[in-house]
């Protein structure tokens, strides 16, 4: 997967990431909203005003966290 998001800042950085979690929001076919927690594993590149993620997202099963 390849994702580009806007950010504030002018720094430049390239790093490998295997322990970052993101909340991903979306809409299903019926128009209902949903949100999932996903772990990101891959390369993160930050350039002025953009953050580029290149890697895989793995959904975290939140029912496991209740125990």
Image (cartoon, helix red, strand yellow):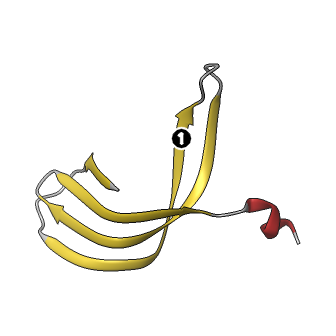
Q: Is residue 42 above or below residue 33?
A: below
Q: Which residue is mark 1?
A: 25
Residue 1 coordinates in the image, percent (x, y): 35, 56
Q: Residue furthest top?
A: 30
Residue 15 coordinates in the image, percent (x, y): 25, 78
Left-right relation of 49 to 36: left
Question: Residue drawn 17% across and 57% down?
Answer: 9
Corner quadrant of residue 60? bottom right
Question: Residue drawn 62% across and 50% down?
Answer: 36
Corner quadrant of residue 46? bottom left
10 Å crowding of disc 1: few (<14), some (14-19), many (20+): few
Q: Is residue 64 above or below residue 52?
A: below
Q: Is residue 45 above or below residue 34?
A: below
Left-right relation of 56 to 39: left
Secondary element at image label 1:
strand
Question: Residue drawn 28% across and 47% down?
Answer: 5
Residue 13 coordinates in the image, percent (x, y): 16, 73
């Amino acid at each position: 997967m390849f994702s580009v998001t806007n950010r504030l800042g002018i720094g430049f950085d390239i790093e490998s990431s295997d322990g970052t979690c993101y909340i991903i929001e979306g809409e299903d076919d019926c128009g209902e909203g949903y949100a999932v927690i996903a772990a990101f594993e891959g390369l993160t590149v930050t350039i002025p005003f953009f953050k580029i993620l290149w890697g895989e997202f793995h959904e975290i099963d939140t029912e496991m966290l209740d125990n």
